Image (tube, rainbow, N blue to C red):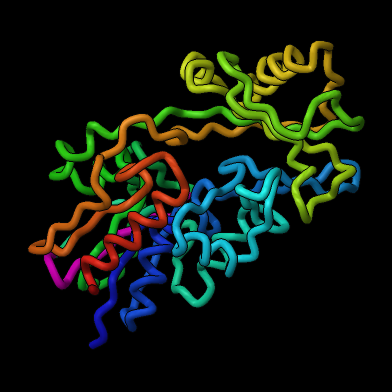
Amino acid sequence: MTETIAILGAGLAGLSAARHLAARGIAVRLFDKGRAPGGRLATRRAEHAGRRLQFDHGAQYLRAAGPGFAAALEAAGAAPWPDPARRVGIPGMSALPRALAEGLAITASRHAGRILGEAGAWRIQHWDAKEAKPGTPLPATPPIEDGPFSAVLVTIPAPQAIDLLPGMADALRPVRYAPCWTVMAHFDAKLPLPDTLRPEGHAIGWAARDSSKPGRDGAAECWVVQAAPAWTRAHLEAHAEDIVAPLLAELATLAGAPLPAPAWAAAHRWRYSLLEAPLGQPFLWDATRRIGLAGDWCLAGRAEAAWDSGAALAAALAP
């Protein structure tokens, strides 16, 4: 029987590990709670008055310092925006993980809730992601069980990995993320603001005219507004519909004038957005149990750190 490695999480770390292992002829299978791979490389699509809208409501752009990640972005068709040092996906950020996932076996919309078995014969129990949510009790409905897997790599955020691997809690608990409320808004008229804003000491950490990115509908006037950590924490448990107006009111302070009401708007909460306290090493690997962990949380709050972490863990398995 051909050995297969299970990878839980199909964000950049999981995709990087999977691609590096597949290049060495090792079979992999990824599980992800999202409808598609990518994690925070996400694009929300909507429609208003017959116009198709889209918003990169997670990662806004990527930078590549090393040749490995730079080559991956080049192969995935990333384009410069808003300057030559930063890259975005076309027609949306979600296009990048789709390209990086090509040829990989991915089980999407599934919440991996239990790892059972032993080294060399691990089994994954997973539930419909609409029924099972991280941080909540597992549903009473029977799971689907897959395996055996020769090893398991966990590439989800560290706080969520504790639920799967309680024995790793002491190592993972110091890792800390800041949350981020994000508002997506479409306006019928152009706002009197530059394409990107990163104000200091403001309720807003980042705001951008998302429709100014290459490959988008430049006339759509679509905005992504991301709250700073302090503002997000103060409103963390608010309902999404109660976030839109106050965060757009903060955007109006940057414009110096009232803004028109959005024609369409929605909010999304990222509980694990900006890394504040990393693990301080590239990955965790238990060679005896054949269980490993990787993610941006291992190294730094950058997308490239997730890619490098996944590649380093894969190299530990298959030098």
Which quadrant of the view contains residue 185?
Answer: top right
Tell me the residue at 22%/69% (across/down): 317
Q: Where's the C terminus, which quadrant?
A: bottom left
Which residue occupies 33% across, 79% down?
A: 27
Side (left or right) of 165 relative to 253:
left
Between 154 and 238, the one lying in front of the other is 154
Q: In this view, does 144 lie above or below 132?
A: below
225 and 309: which is toward the camera: 309
Could you say which is closer to the camera, residue 193 or residue 263?
A: 193
What is the quadrant of the N terminus in the image? bottom left
Name the outermost residue toward the left: 288
**Is-magenta flag for residue 120?**
yes
Find residue 274 and report its horizontal and vertical position in percent: 45, 33
**Residue 194 visible, this orientation:** yes
Magenta segment includes 180: no
Main secondary-structure element of the magenta-colored stretch: strand
Q: What stretch is highlighted in magenta?
A: 118-129
Q: Where is residue 309 in the image (x, y as percent from the top left)?
A: 33, 54
Query: Residue at the spot x=61%, y=21% of the render?
Result: 204
Where residue 19 sits, quadrant-wise, is bottom left
How many numbered circles are shown?
0
Which quarter of the figure has residue 77? Answer: bottom right
Q: In this view, does 308 lie above or below 175?
A: below
Is 216 situated left or right of 285 in this image? right
Residue 83: x and y, percent? 68, 45
80 on left or right of 216: left
How far from the left and from the top, in percent, is residue 44? Answer: 67, 46
Q: Can residue 184 be seen in this view?
A: no
Q: Nearer the viewer, residue 186 or 73?
A: 73
Q: Residue at x 59, y 15 (%)?
A: 202
